[in-house]
C-alpha cells in the first residue's frame, strides 16, 4: 500500500511542482519582458505571418498559450485588436507553447540540483532586482527538471512491478479517441497543456507509455487547454467570443485532420530521435506547427464561419475602455493599458478646460453643457480605471512597475479633480446667464490670459505623462509657478477694479472662484509632472 502511495505522490507531487515551476517562470519572465510582449501584441497587423510570429514570441515569453489567448480575448474585448488579427496571433501561440515540452524532454541528469541551488542563492542574497529575476528564472528551470525527475521516478515502477498499469494505459491510449479524451480531461483539470504534455513525456522517459498512446494524449491536451478560454469568452463581447471559439475550432479540427493518419505520423516521429521522451516532444511540436500552417490560408474562412456562428449584437459597445479584465492574466499588459486609459481621460480633461473657457468668456451655454456631461464621463472612466488597477497583482510586477502602479492611482485622482474643477467653471456660466452677470473688458482679458496659461500647464503635464519626458514635466512645474504669480497679480488688479467701480459687484465671486479653480488645476498639473519626474 505504501509503495502505491509513493508512486502516486511522486507523479501527482511532481506534476504540482512542475505547474508551480511554470507559474513562477511565467511570472518572472513577465517582470523581465512583459512590456515587450505587450508591444509585440499591440503592433500586430493583418499580416498572417507577422501575426503568427508575434503569437509565438509572446507565448515563448509568457510560457503559456492560455495566458496569450486570454490576453488576446482582453485586447479584442477592448477593441484594440480585431478578431481576424487575434486568429493570426493564436496560430503562432500554438507553436510557441511547444517550447516547454522540447526543453524538459532532454535528459539533463542531476543538473537540476545546481540550477535550484544557484537560482535560490541568487534570489535570496542579491539586492539587485535584475540579478534576482535571473536567479528566479534559473531556479524555475531547476524546478521543472526536478519535477520531471519526480514524475519519472513515480512512473518507472509501472513498467516493472505493476505491468498491468502500463498495459491499461497503453491499451486505452491505443484507442485514439479515448486517449484524446483522457488528455483533454487532464489538461482541462490542470488548465495547462504544457503540464499535461510534460507528464506524458515523463511517463515516456520511464517507459510507462508507448509513443502512439502518448501522441493521442498530447493531442487531447491541446483541446483540453481551450476550456479556460471558452469560459472566459462567456461574458465577453461578440468578437472576443469568436476569439475563444476559434481557438477551440483550430485544435479540434487539427486533431480531426491528424486522426486518420495517426499510424503513419507515429512512424514518422520515430525517425526524429532515438529517445521516446524526445519523440513525444517532437510529435507535439510537429503537430502544432503543421496545424498552424494548415490554417494560414484558411484564416478568412475560419473568421467568416465564426462570424456566422456568433452574429453581431445590435447596439453592442466595443472598446469602451482600453482595458479588459482578461488582461489581468498578464499584469504588465493590464498596467500598460490602464496607463493608456488614464492618458485618454487626461486628454479629455484638457478639452474640458478649453470648452469651459469658451463657455465662461463667450457665454456659450452649449459648451457649458458639454463640459458638465464630460465630467460624468471622466468620473466614470477614473472610477473604472482605479478599480481595474486595484485588481492588478502587484507581486507579479517588477519593482519599477509596482511603484508606477501606485502613482497611476494618484494621477487618476488628479485628473478626476481637474474634471471637477472644469465643471465648476462651466456651472458658473449658468449663474452668469441667469443673473445677467457681465465681466468688464479688462477682466475678460485677464481671465483669457489665465485660462491659456493654465491650459498650457496642464496639457504640458499630460504630454509629459504620455511621453515619460522628464524635461517636459519640469517645464510644466515651471509653468505652474507662473500660474501662481499670475493669480496673485490678477487678484490685485481685480481688487483695484472693484474699488474704482469698474467691475460689476455681482461678478466678484465668479471672477475670484474662477481664478481659484484654475489655480487648483495647475496644482494638479504640478502633481502629475512630479510623478513623471519621480517615475524611477
Image (tube, grey):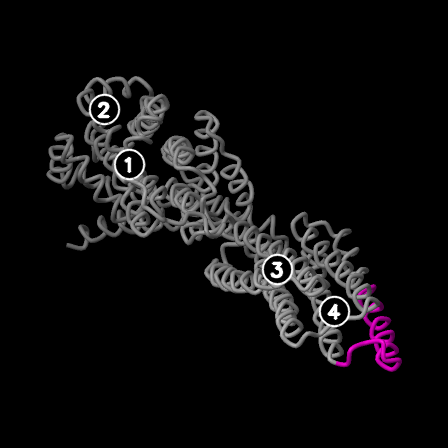
* Mark 3 or mark 4, whichever is nearer to me: 3
Earlier-in-chain disc, 3 versus 2 = 2
Earlier-in-chain disc, 4 versus 2 = 2
Mark 3 neighbour class, 10 Å CA radius: few under 14, some 14 to 19, many 20 or more: many
Is 77 positioned to the left or the right of 491 in the image? left
* Mark 3 or mark 1, whichever is nearer to me: 3
- The residue that label 2 is drawn on is 258
| Residue 102 shown in magenta | no
Q: Is residue 238 above or below residue 399?
A: above
Where, by quadrant of the figure, is residue 250 drawn?
top left
Mark 2 → mark 1, Cα distance in angstroms: 13 Å
Residue 216, how many percent across, how many down? 21, 31
Earlier-in-chain disc, 3 versus 4 = 3
- The residue that label 1 is drawn on is 222
* Mark 4 or mark 1, whichever is nearer to me: 4
* Mark 3 or mark 2, whichever is nearer to me: 3
Residue 51, how many percent across, how many down? 45, 30
Q: Secondary structure at mark 4?
A: helix
Q: Secondary structure at mark 2?
A: helix
**Residue range corresponding to the magenta coloring:** 481-505
Q: Main secondary structure of the magenta part?
A: helix
Which numbered dot is residue 519? 4
- The residue that label 3 is drawn on is 367
Proximity of marks 4 and 1: CB atoms separated by less than 8 Å:
no
Q: Is residue 149 above or below residue 439?
A: above
Amino acid at each position: 500500500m505504501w509503495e502505491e502511495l509513493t508512486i502516486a505522490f511522486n507523479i501527482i507531487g511532481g506534476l504540482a511542482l512542475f505547474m508551480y515551476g511554470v507559474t513562477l517562470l511565467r511570472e518572472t519572465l513577465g517582470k523581465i519582458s512583459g512590456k515587450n510582449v505587450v508591444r509585440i501584441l499591440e503592433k500586430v497587423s493583418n499580416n498572417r505571418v507577422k501575426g503568427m510570429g508575434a503569437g509565438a514570441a509572446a507565448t515563448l515569453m509568457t510560457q503559456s498559450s492560455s495566458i496569450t489567448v486570454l490576453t488576446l480575448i482582453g485586447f479584442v474585448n477592448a477593441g484594440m485588436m480585431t478578431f481576424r488579427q487575434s486568429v493570426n496571433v493564436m496560430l503562432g501561440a500554438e507553436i510557441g507553447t511547444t517550447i516547454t515540452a522540447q526543453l524538459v524532454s532532454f535528459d539533463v541528469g542531476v543538473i537540476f540540483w545546481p540550477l535550484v541551488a544557484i537560482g535560490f542563492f541568487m534570489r535570496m542574497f542579491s539586492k539587485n532586482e535584475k540579478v534576482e529575476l535571473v536567479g528566479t528564472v534559473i531556479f524555475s528551470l531547476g524546478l521543472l527538471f526536478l519535477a520531471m525527475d519526480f514524475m519519472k521516478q513515480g512512473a518507472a515502477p509501472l513498467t516493472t512491478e505493476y505491468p498491468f498499469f502500463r498495459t491499461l494505459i497503453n491499451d486505452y491510449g491505443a484507442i485514439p479517441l479515448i486517449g484524446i479524451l483522457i488528455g483533454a480531461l487532464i489538461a482541462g483539470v490542470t488548465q495547462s497543456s504544457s503540464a499535461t504534455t510534460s507528464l506524458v513525456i515523463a511517463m515516456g522517459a520511464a517507459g510507462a507509455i508507448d509513443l502512439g498512446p502518448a501522441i493521442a494524449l498530447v493531442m487531447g491536451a491541446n483541446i483540453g487547454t481551450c476550456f479556460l478560454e471558452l469560459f472566459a469568452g462567456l461574458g465577453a463581447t461578440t468578437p472576443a467570443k469568436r476569439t475563444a471559439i476559434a481557438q477551440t475550432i483550430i485544435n479540434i479540427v487539427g486533431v480531426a485532420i491528424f486522426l486518420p493518419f495517426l499510424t503513419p505520423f507515429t512512424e514518422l516521429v520515430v525517425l526524429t530521435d532515438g529517445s521516446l521522451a524526445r519523440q513525444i516532444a517532437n510529435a507535439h511540436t510537429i503537430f502544432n506547427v503543421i496545424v498552424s500552417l494548415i490554417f494560414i490560408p484558411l484564416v478568412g474562412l475560419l473568421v467568416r464561419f465564426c462570424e456566422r456562428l456568433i452574429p453581431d449584437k445590435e447596439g453592442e459597445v466595443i472598446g469602451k475602455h482600453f482595458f479588459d479584465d482578461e488582461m489581468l492574466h498578464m499584469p504588465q499588459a493590464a498596467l500598460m493599458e490602464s496607463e493608456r486609459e488614464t492618458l485618454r481621460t487626461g486628454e479629455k480633461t484638457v478639452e474640458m478646460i478649453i470648452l469651459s473657457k469658451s463657455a465662461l468668456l463667450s457665454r456659450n451655454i452649449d459648451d457649458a453643457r458639454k463640459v458638465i456631461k464630460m465630467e460624468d464621463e471622466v468620473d466614470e472612466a477614473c472610477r473604472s480605471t482605479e478599480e481595474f488597477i486595484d485588481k492588478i497583482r502587484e507581486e507579479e510586477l517588477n519593482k519599477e512597475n509596482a511603484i508606477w502602479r501606485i502613482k497611476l492611482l494618484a494621477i487618476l485622482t488628479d485628473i478626476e479633480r481637474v474634471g471637477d474643477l472644469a465643471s465648476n467653471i462651466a456651472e458658473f456660466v449658468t449663474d452668469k446667464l441667469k443673473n445677467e452677470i457681465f465681466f468688464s473688458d479688462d477682466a475678460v482679458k485677464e481671465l483669457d490670459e489665465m485660462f491659456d496659461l493654465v491650459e498650457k500647464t496642464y496639457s504640458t503635464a499630460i504630454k509629459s505623462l504620455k511621453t515619460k519626458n522628464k524635461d517636459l514635466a519640469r517645464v510644466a512645474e515651471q509653468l505652474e509657478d507662473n500660474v501662481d504669480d499670475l493669480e496673485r497679480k490678477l487678484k490685485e488688479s481685480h481688487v483695484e477694479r472693484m474699488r474704482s467701480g469698474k467691475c460689476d459687484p455681482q461678478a466678484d465671486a465668479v471672477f475670484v472662484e474662477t481664478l481659484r479653480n484654475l489655480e487648483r488645476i495647475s496644482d494638479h498639473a504640478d502633481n502629475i509632472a512630479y510623478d513623471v519626474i519621480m517615475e524611477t
